[in-house]
Image (tube, rainbow, N blue to C red):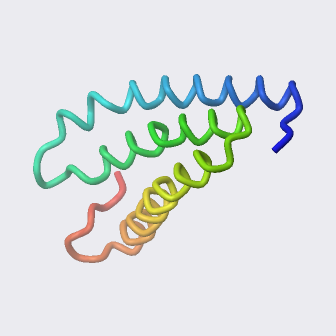
Amino acid sequence: MDIPSAARWLLLAAAAAQFAYAVRALRPALRSRPGERVDPWLAFADPAVGVPVSLALAFGNLTAFLAGMAVLAPVLTWQLVRGIAARRGEPGKPTPA
């Protein structure tokens, strides 16, 4: 893959921002109680896995990008499923605040 120089710098900046979000989301994930563990860990996993995906794109490494997307896709899908379930108010699912 041939990534233009400006796009490479933007992807590196995005990876740095995702790293900051992952560090910020780690503390609530570590403090979560057993009944409410999934949402904080998904909030941490999304940017934490997004960092290597952004870096793989920035450096044009297709193999690392596909491996990262194989991990990131289920995380994003599960966040979507939990968000839809929370809006519907299904029993056993957390309701939005």
Q: Is residue 87 left or right of residue 40?
A: right
Q: In the displayed structure, would residue 83 be above or below residue 66? A: below
Residues 96 and 81: in front is 81
Q: Residue at x 27, y 54 (%)?
A: 38
Number of disc labels: 0
Indicate the position of residue 52 as horizontal and vertical percent values: 54, 37
Indicate the position of residue 13 as horizontal and vertical percent values: 68, 23
Q: In the displayed structure, would residue 55 be above or below residue 71? A: above
Residues 86 and 57: in front is 57
Q: Residue at x 43, y 31 (%)?
A: 22
Indicate the position of residue 53 as horizontal and vertical percent values: 59, 42
Quadrant of the rendered structure where residue 59 is? top right
Quadrant of the rendered structure where residue 11 is? top right
Q: Residue at x 27, y 61 (%)?
A: 94
Residues 59 and 43: in front is 59
Looking at the image, the residue that sits furthest to the left is 34
Q: Residue at x 82, y 31 (%)?
A: 7
Indicate the position of residue 5 as horizontal and vertical percent values: 86, 25
State which quarter of the image contains the N terminus. Answer: top right
